[in-house]
């Protein structure tokens, strides 16, 4: 009994349930499922049934849904007309007589989770049906998300962002004005003149910023300011020592990279404009920015590194 209850749907065995990018140029949905808990509830007629708590990990976020066995069956019946490769009958045993037995419930929990992974894999990177999104209680996708034109040279399609997406914007400077308050603490305002300011972007999804604060901050003040900016502004500050900033920004970025990227030709002379120490500072500063990004990055997040400083 327990062996049959735990049986993984056959059509799932050859598919990768993590659904990372695989063969072909079409990006796969990065999504994982887990059913960690169950509960016994009662329907309107007083009959008990098992409710399965489904957690969907998608775009770095978690979505919860409560479903019973018959809802899985209804989902499968609806998906068969939209997704090729699904079996005719729902592949998880019903067990009508002892469906509330602990071993049956536990076996179903494993098999139902495997079914969701296999059903999603059967899409082969295509559009997720609206009924599956609704079943998992995911935000509904924009209508044109999976029909966007392909990128240059046959690259993957340029897909619009969904509300469930997260974009991490990384720049040398945060789109904030940070200064010391007269009575202590900090005064923080959004800088509407910044290219990456929150109003101009209008991305329609969750946005986080990573960058410098533009003022001197003592080491013992960094943690408090970082908590303030993250909690109130979704910003993660990068604190660089003054000597490193001087070689990184004024040295390598402004003196070497900026003329190259802005088509400013230097007159020939005996000197070499490249400075090894400035390059090492540039590398060290970029590593610090990357480390800060990785503090909040999760699979599925988009990272946008802005301008030539990074």
Image (cartoon, helix red, strand yellow):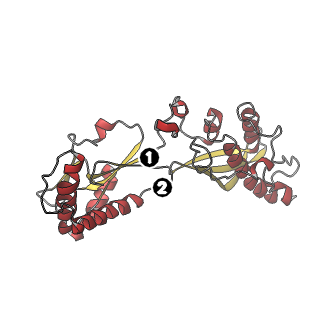
Q: Residues within 10 Å of mark 1 (few under 14, many from 20)?
A: many
State how far apart marks 1 and 2 are (Cα): 9 Å
Give the quarter of the figure containing the C terminus: bottom left
Whether residues under marks 1 and 2 lie with C-beta atoms below 8 angstroms apart, the answer is yes
Q: Is residue 24 visible?
A: yes
Number of the label disc, if any, that sits on residue 242: none
Provide residue 2's location: percent of width, then percent of height. Answer: 84, 60
Mark 2 lies on a secondary structure that is loop
How many numbered callouts? 2
Residue visible at 62% across and 42% down in the picture: 136
- The residue identified by callout 1 is 166
* Residue nearest the viewer, comparing 275 with 228: 275
Provide residue 5's location: percent of width, then percent of height. Answer: 82, 55
Nearer-N-terminus badge (1/2): 1
Residue visible at 23% across and 53% down in the picture: 257
Q: Residue furthest top?
A: 143
- Judge from the rendering whether residue 52 lies leftward or rightward of residue 212; answer left or right: right
**Does 146 sit above or below residue 211?**
above
**Does 176 sit above or below residue 84?**
below
Provide residue 95's location: percent of width, then percent of height. Answer: 86, 49
Mark 1 lies on a secondary structure that is strand
- The residue identified by callout 2 is 298
- Judge from the rendering whether residue 275 lies leftward or rightward of residue 93; answer left or right: left
Residue visible at 87% across and 46% down in the picture: 96
* Residue nearest the viewer, comparing 281 with 300: 281
- Answer with the quarter of the image where residue 65 lies: top right
């Amino acid at each position: 009994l327990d062996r049959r209850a735990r049986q993984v749907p056959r059509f799932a065995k050859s598919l990768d349930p993590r659904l990372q990018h695989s063969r072909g140029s079409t990006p796969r949905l990065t999504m994982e499922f887990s059913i960690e808990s169950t509960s016994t509830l009662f329907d309107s007629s007083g009959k008990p049934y098992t409710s399965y708590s489904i957690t969907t990990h998608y775009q770095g976020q978690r979505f919860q849904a409560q479903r019973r066995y018959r809802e899985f069956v209804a989902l499968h019946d609806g998906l068969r007309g939209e997704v090729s490769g699904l079996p005719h009958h729902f592949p998880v045993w019903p067990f009508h007589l002892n469906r509330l037995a602990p071993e049956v419930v536990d076996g179903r929990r494993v098999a139902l989770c495997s079914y969701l992974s296999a059903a999603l894999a059967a899409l082969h990177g295509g559009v997720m049906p609206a009924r599956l999104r609704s079943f998992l209680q995911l935000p509904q996708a924009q209508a044109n998300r999976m029909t966007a034109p392909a990128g240059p040279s046959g690259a993957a399609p340029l897909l619009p962002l969904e509300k469930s997406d997260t974009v991490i914007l990384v720049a040398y400077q945060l789109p904030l004005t940070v200064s010391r308050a007269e009575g202590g603490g900090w005064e923080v305002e959004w800088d509407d003149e910044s290219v990456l300011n929150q109003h101009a972007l209008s991305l329609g999804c969750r946005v986080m910023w990573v960058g410098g604060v533009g003022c001197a901050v003592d080491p013992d003040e960094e943690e408090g300011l970082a908590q303030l900016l993250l909690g109130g502004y979704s910003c993660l500050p990068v604190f660089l020592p003054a000597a490193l900033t001087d070689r990184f920004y004024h040295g390598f970025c402004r003196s070497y990279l900026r003329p190259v990227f802005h088509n400013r030709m230097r007159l020939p002379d005996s000197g070499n404009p490249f400075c090894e120490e400035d390059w090492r500072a540039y590398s060290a500063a970029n590593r610090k920015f990357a480390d800060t990004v990785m503090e909040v990055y999760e699979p599925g997040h988009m990272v946008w590194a802005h301008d030539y400083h990074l």
